[in-house]
Image (tube, helix red, strand yellow):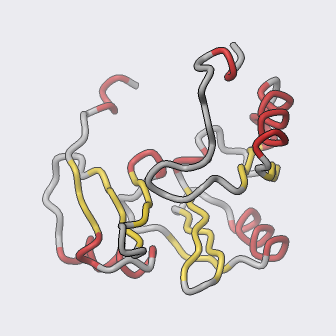
Amino acid sequence: MLIQKLKSNINFKGYDAVPLKAIHLEQSEAGDFRSEIQEIAKKEKIKILEEFDYNKWTQDNKFIIKKNNKLYVLADDSVTLCYINHMKSKYNMKFDRLPWMTQGGNCFLGKLPNGENYVLHGDKNRYITAKDYNDISEKFGVKKENIFFISQPDFEAWV
């Protein structure tokens, strides 16, 4: 199925966050998808950067963010040091580990009207501690009052 057939008015300008500047593709999983996404990226002026992480769910275990005017790879414990060291050297990125409960599909980064960053984070129906706020604030460079936990469905039962 082609992405372009899904909806005719798709745009990649960003919604609540910022415009998409680059897509990091997992080279070992890109397959037939590669040529189509490259075509869209060229039209939309988005960079395609391909790396080997050997992780099918690579979007769930890392973020690439800008914090204190520096690029960071925030990654969980499943991400190898080989990948991290490659990203650090190739793109001059810093590195830090993600807070234990943060996953890519569970967390959204955006900007408030005043220009400050915020985090929307799924809570998985659990008690949120002060340490959770501290960890997310430190790792993502966001004020604690700009961290919002929202309930989410129990999707793990479907897997």
Outermost residue, left direction?
127
**Above or below: residue 111 compared with residue 70:** above
- Residue depicted at 55% across the width and 59% down the height: 18
- Toward the viewer: 11 or 78? 11
Against 150, residue 127 (above or below) is: below
Residue 51 shows in this picture: no
Residue 130 image position (x, y, % from top left): 18, 76
Residue 19, horizontal then vertical, whole percent:
61, 55
Give left or right: position of 68 versus 116. right
Total numbered labels: 0
Q: Nearer the viewer, residue 136 or 57?
A: 136
Q: What residue is shown at x 40% (from left), y 58% (from top)? A: 102
Viewer-nearest residue: 121 or 100:
121
Direction from residue 125 to residue 45 in the image, left or right: right
Residue 129: in sight, yes or no?
yes
Q: Residue furthest bottom?
A: 68
Q: Quadrant of the C terminus?
A: top left
Q: Position of residue 69 (x, y in %)?
A: 61, 84
At a point 44% along the width and 60% down the height, the residue shown is: 109
Q: Is residue 58 toward the left or the right of residue 97 in the image?
A: right
Residue 43 % position (x, y):
81, 39
Q: Is residue 49 left or right of residue 22?
A: right
Quarter-of-image position of residue 132: bottom left
Q: Quadrant of residue 1?
A: top right
Residue 153, placed above or below residue 19: above
Which residue occupies 73% across, 51% down?
Answer: 24
Q: Quadrant of residue 137?
A: bottom left
